[in-house]
Image (cartoon, rainbow, N blue to C red):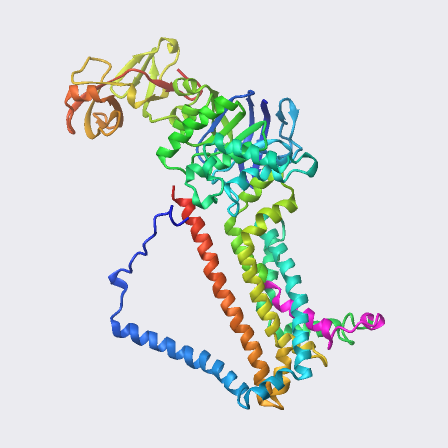
Amino acid sequence: MPSEQPKARKPRRGEAVTEPLWIRCALTAVALGFLGLLLMLPLAAIFVQAFEKGWEAYLAALTDPETIAAIRLTLLVAAVAVPLNTVFGVAAAWAISKFEFPGKNLLTTLIDLPYSVSPVIAGMIFVLLFAPGGWFGPWLEAIHLKIIFAVPGMILATLFVTFPFVARELIPLMQSQGIEEEEAARALGAGGWQIFWRVTLPNIKWGLLYGIILCNARCMGEFGAVSVVSGVALTLTLQVESLYKQNMTAAFAVASLLTLLGVVTLVLKSLLEWKIPKQTAEEAMGYCGD
Amino acid sequence: MSIEVQNIRKTFGSFTALDGVSLTVGAGELVALLGPSGSGKTTLLRIIAGLEQSDPGSGPILFHDEDVGGRRIGDRAVGFVFQHYALFRHMTVFDNVAFGLRVRPRKSRPSDALIRHKVDQLLQLVQLDTFATRYPHQLSGGQRQRVALARALAIEPKVLLLDEPFGALDAKVRQELRRWLRRLHDEIHVTSVFVTHDQEEALELADRVVVMNEGRIEQIGAPDEVFHHPATEFVMNFLGQVNLFGGRVEEGKIHFSTVAFDAPEHAQLQNQPVKVFIRPHEFEVGEFTDGQTCIRATISRINSAGPNVRLLLMAETGESLSVELPQERFRQLKLQAGSQVYLTPRGLKVFGDDYVI
């Protein structure tokens, strides 16, 4: 509670590391100019383009049956991929941060694999495995299951690409929290599930939410891997690309949706970032001061 | 409930943490495991608790003559207090203490009203009844430690195990909490073992002290016994400050520095090298020589802040010595840095290669 802790006054930067005013202004201006040129200008351009032919054209583009279908499909892919990767991410992070077992380093490395593999290659891998001429192709054909150039393939590709997001977010957090609380719970007679639900999960909830939000943003924004395995049905990103060749305004209208998603993600992310350090700082502060 | 462990071994890779340790703790006793870091004391405590498994080939772990070696910690009915408290950070003090009762299987779980009653009682016992709705980060270190203790006691443990319970606290809080824990133990009489590297804490708090070093037990005894009759050089050295002299035994006398003492019981030893230990308070400080038994030394530093005055001296033979004397005596002698004094050893402990005098 703030009332109990003495308010920590921020130590002022020493004079020694301060630059003259004009240098500071110049550096700030360069940074802002760069940001404006590379981030703000394109962002504005999207909305300008989207509304070029007015509100009605914008709404018409968004309510087009194909666009609606793309929104649906994007939501479907995210609705499957995000929960699966959440469960996987929590399980992996739990195993890695709380237990010692052979192959732990290998697992940690494997989780990072999707980061280092280009999404297009990721898509190709699935084509190689599941396409009619691929390894499992004949067998899939025999049971009349179409994965590649269909929705299951898009979900698989998205799963692969967004695999690390939740786990990567949680592992450092859980490692820093240690296993003492879990040991304490075990000493008090709690079982594995009780420890997870009552002790571990509440401790990681903000980090977990952060990971889920990032995972979701990537799910909805993924293009490369999904485009390789997609068929007739398109997600929002693919829809933007397809419209781009025919109808600029409609393409930017749909793009503006994705941009809004990005902005919402960014706001949520900042909110959580503000929440997480505050929480840990409060605890850290409490733990060292008597 | 008594605790008995026999021939416990534990290795971590190539490091031997415990090398065949056997120990018995009587019912209702308060025992300290004392040793430097790496001596295996925490590992022993964690093995007794069931947080670690001893290596195959180790002897049994008996609680009241019943082998609990195969049981998990949750089934051993031990209360464990962690060095850094390990309170559940997202739960209030009340919920922390209630945790052990709430996670019980439905049929043995007390009713909510009973849990409430019991937690209130425990919080009263640890004098934190007004803090029930606070979170751990809103408490001081000493308060947190008491919550951890109340939480451990909530499951009515047969054995209470504490890992460096006061390690993370300020000196002053530590002392208060130490006395408080002793009073609490006298009240509830649960068999308790605590780990510490602070000899003062072990000597003040425990009924018996187990001094450990490099995975072995050096000595077990009452505080008085281990302090005044150390069994080994290590125990002598670890329990308080010492001055060390290299000496030898010859013709029934111990020679070291510029002095010689009679040791008729070792008349048969010829020119045997020994180590002579003298605690700082076991020197008589005088202005004049009394002949044979004095060491002449020059005071190099005086620290008079404290109940006793501590002197750092340089003996004429080159050893650096530390000596403690009462304030009164210090004022009588009008000592100053640079003055020369004569030190007469009043008590000494001699260790040879394989014997103790």
On the image, the x and y values in percent for residue B233 come to: 41, 24
With respect to residue A235, does B107 lie above or below? above
Span highlighted in magenta in the image: A139-165
- Of residues A223 and B322, the one nearer the viewer is A223
Percent across and percent down for residue B337 are 16, 29
Give the residue at x 50% y 26%.
Answer: B217
Q: Provide residue B283's location: percent of width, then percent of height.
A: 26, 19
Residue in the foreground of this view, choosing between A265 and B277: A265
Q: Quadrant of the N terminus of chain B?
A: top right
- Quarter of the picture containing the C terminus of chain B is top left
Q: Is residue B61 left or right of residue B223?
A: right
Residue B52, visible in the rendered structure? no
Relative placement, left or right, of A65 versus A279 is: right
Q: Position of residue B306 (x, y in %)?
A: 26, 28
| Magenta span contains residue A232 | no
Q: Viewed as shown, does residue B91 lie left or right of A67?
A: left
Camera-nearest residue between B248 and B288 = B288
